[in-house]
């Protein structure tokens, strides 16, 4: 692993330089024999010491509390700790090892206690409260938003608690921090612990050569003969979709679905129970009826009632169609297997793909040769150029944490520097599954609040996109599926939210917005995946260089709503499960699997498998930020469909509309209420109509 921190840059002066240029902390491993974990520990400890001193100075300031000397000073404290924890947590997701896992476990309680010491500091909160009560009406724009957010953050972190209640809050926070970290570590280890080793080539019938080659390469890397398939998406999904061998599909499915349920040290069932109960107890200690009540007060949805209204509206609109779609797939399976055949979860991808191919004379796999990763990257970057005038220049002088990672300078249309963008595309055992965008530094500015923030007077962000795309083999480049192209666009949308940020305060910058608003920029970008004008800019055959045939594009468009209702209900089922856990008023006592089946039962359209349990693998709501918030994907989908309908009306590359989307929405981060931002861009509130129309239900 490439070390991300060098022992050569630990002086105060060099750390201050790092705060301006965080990429200076990305150094090659040959510069230090120490592991990143060994180097990070003293930085974390020193960071806590520095921030404690800074907080003490603010809390004990003899001057009358003001927004500037208290709230702004608070937001500008803790820079060293922020950098060190950012590195640690980002690498835990993208490039971890046993030492880093051990460090994070050891530091979890200390960092939780440190955070509580700040949020429960009575002198500090008294000053914040004074500024809130005396200055809120005098402030405007970002200043007002920051003061509101900071005051509410302290309230929601127990600042108004006293005595024994504060100590209880500390204990709950510490334990929750430890449990969520352990959940993620267990899931990664369980994912890596299983392989499907195939020794007979006849068992690979149905799989294209590229998948067999990748599996052979995986086997060779492990010193094994034959083919090896893993539970990582680029290996798992093609096998479940194309492999004719039903027994092996079932075996792989059961291995995937039973992760973290086994009687071993990686079992997450007890941890899930603890996480759900700890969150509820913290919320109720603060005076909320349940965790969802607590979480949704800072979301567009506002309360559980509005979340359930969205989910139930979607059920009413989509469920009958979804049931039809599943029945059609089962009928197709019975044509091949006989009338007594029962469609199981390990059959759905396989037979739904066959039905799609027959119905539309179209196999989405035929697109892969036209989606070479390097070309897709050019197309996605080029889309940003068409819309916003920005461009991307690879910068090989930026050291990175792993050899596959690439760095780009993002340059605005006026030639000014906007951001550093890191891209990390391929799966490895040191990286968790899925795809995500994160920051190594948020955009912010030290100029006075009445001075407009520009790229010239602000600290520009360092943004990262991490995915698990299909890897290249010895004989073939990385060729993406349509789903992977959409994933690239999705995470790039998040990245643009960070890249374009123009705010004074880190706490309001980029993706620091309400959780049910943060998916709008990302899901908006996915709309381009099936637009012919966009596809024509990059989709060329990796061998012949011929353009993606027009007939393929038309079949792609014609088939775009295939299983749309089923996949909508799948997302709704996750939202129902999430809300079921976090609207509990009492301890979760039921068996996790039984609770799960009851929570989403009304929208489950395939038989439940006793050995499978989604909850113990559901990182989004257990160790991520989506607790009582998974509905956000569908909430934001209503927004993104409505927003893209304007581009369809004006032209999908219309620069005037894109400029409004950038300046009125993306740049603003959390400086204004999200609905206010959206209405400024769109000119009206969103409705579900655009989504129903896009999905072919209206």
Image (cartoon, grey):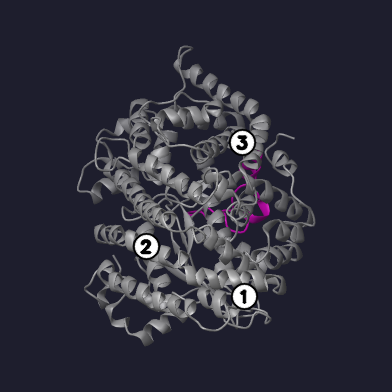
Q: Earlier in the sequence, mark 3 or mark 1?
A: 1
Q: Position of residue 20 (x, y in %)?
A: 47, 81
Q: Position of residue 467 (x, y in %)?
A: 44, 55
- Residue occupying image coordinates x 73% and y 59%: 676
Q: Residue at x 37, y 76 (%)?
A: 25
Give the residues in magenta: 531-559
- What x and y, as percent, mark residue 8? 28, 82
Front residue of this view, candidates 17 and 236: 17
Whether residue 232 is visible to the viewer of this picture, yes or no, is yes
Above or below, comparing residue 320 to residue 168 in the picture: above
Q: In terms of secondary structure, where does tag 2 sit?
A: helix
Provide the residue designation for mark 2: 113
Is label 1 in a helix, a strand or a loop?
Answer: loop
Dot 1, crowdedness within 10 Å: few (<14), some or many (≥20)?
some
Which comes sooner in the sequence, label 2 or label 1? Answer: 2
Residue 532 part of the magenta-drawn span: yes
Mark 3, residue position: 564
| Residue denoted by label 1 | 412
């Amino acid at each position: 692993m490439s070390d991300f921190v060098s022992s050569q840059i630990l002086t105060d002066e060099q750390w201050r330089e790092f705060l301006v240029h965080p990429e200076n902390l990305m150094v090659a491993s040959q510069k230090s024999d120490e592991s990143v974990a060994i180097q990070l520990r003293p930085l974390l400890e020193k960071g806590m010491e520095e921030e404690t001193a800074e907080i003490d100075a603010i809390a004990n300031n003899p001057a009358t509390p003001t927004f500037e000397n208290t709230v702004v000073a608070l937001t500008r404290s803790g820079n060293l700790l922020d950098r060190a924890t950012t590195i640690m947590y980002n690498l835990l997701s993208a490039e971890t090892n046993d030492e880093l896992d051990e460090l994070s476990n050891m530091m979890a309680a200390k960092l939780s206690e440190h955070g509580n010491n700040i949020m429960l500091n009575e002198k500090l909160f008294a000053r914040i409260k004074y500024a809130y009560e005396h200055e809120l009406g005098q402030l405007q724009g970002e200043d007002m938003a920051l003061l509101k957010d900071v005051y509410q953050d302290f309230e929601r972190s127990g600042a108004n608690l006293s005595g024994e209640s504060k100590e209880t809050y500390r204990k709950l926070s510490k334990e929750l921090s430890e449990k969520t970290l352990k959940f993620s570590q267990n899931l990664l280890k369980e994912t890596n612990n299983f392989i499907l080793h195939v020794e007979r080539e006849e068992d690979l019938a149905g799989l294209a050569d590229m998948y067999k080659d990748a599996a052979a390469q995986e086997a060779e890397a492990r010193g094994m003969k034959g083919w090896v398939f893993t539970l990582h998406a680029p290996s798992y999904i093609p096998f479940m979709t194309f492999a004719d061998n039903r027994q092996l599909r079932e075996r792989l499915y059961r291995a995937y679905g039973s992760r973290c349920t086994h009687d071993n040290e990686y079992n997450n069932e007890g941890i899930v129970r603890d996480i759900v109960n700890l969150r509820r107890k913290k919320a109720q200690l603060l005076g909320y009826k349940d965790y969802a009540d607590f979480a949704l007060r800072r979301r567009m949805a506002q309360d559980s009632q509005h979340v359930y209204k969205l989910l139930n509206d979607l059920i009413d609109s989509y469920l009958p169609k979804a049931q039809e779609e599943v029945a059609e797939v089962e009928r197709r399976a019975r044509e091949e297997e006989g009338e007594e055949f029962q469609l199981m979860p390990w059959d759905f991808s396989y037979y739904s793909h066959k039905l799609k191919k027959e119905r539309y004379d179209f196999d989405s796999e035929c697109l892969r040769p036209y989606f070479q990763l390097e070309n897709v990257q050019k197309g996605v970057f080029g889309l940003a150029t068409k819309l916003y005038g920005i461009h991307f220049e690879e910068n090989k002088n930026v050291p990175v944490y792993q050899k596959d990672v690439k760095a780009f300078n993002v340059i605005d249309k006026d030639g000014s520097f906007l951001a550093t963008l890191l891209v990390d595309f391929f799966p490895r055992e040191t990286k968790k599954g899925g795809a995500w965008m994160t920051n190594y530094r948020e955009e912010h500015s030290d100029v006075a609040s009445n001075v407009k923030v520009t790229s010239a007077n602000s600290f520009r962000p360092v943004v990262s996109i991490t995915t698990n795309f299909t890897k290249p083999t010895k004989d073939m480049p990385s060729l993406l599926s349509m789903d992977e192209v959409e994933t690239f666009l999705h995470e790039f949308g998040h990245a643009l939210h960070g890249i374009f940020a123009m705010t004074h305060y880190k706490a309001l910058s980029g993706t620091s917005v309400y959780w049910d608003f943060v998916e709008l920029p990302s899901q908006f970008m996915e709309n381009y995946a099936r637009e012919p004008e966009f596809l024509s800019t990059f989709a060329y055959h990796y061998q012949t260089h011929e353009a993606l045939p027009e007939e393929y594009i038309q079949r792609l468009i014609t088939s775009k709503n295939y299983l749309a209702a089923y996949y909508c209900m799948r997302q709704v089922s996750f939202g129902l499960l999430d809300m079921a856990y976090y609207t509990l008023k009492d301890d979760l006592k039921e068996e996790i699997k039984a609770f799960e089946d009851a929570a989403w039962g009304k929208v489950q359209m395939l038989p439940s498998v006793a050995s499978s349990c989604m909850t113990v693998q559901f990182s989004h709501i257990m160790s991520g930020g989506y607790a009582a918030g998974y509905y956000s994907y569908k909430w934001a989908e209503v927004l993104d469909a409505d927003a893209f309908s304007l581009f369809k009306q004006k032209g999908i590359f219309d620069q005037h509309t894109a400029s409004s989307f950038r300046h009125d929405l993306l740049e603003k981060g959390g400086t204004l209420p999200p609905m206010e931002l959206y209405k400024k861009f769109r000119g009206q509130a969103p409705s579900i109509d655009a989504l129903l129309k896009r999905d072919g239900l209206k």
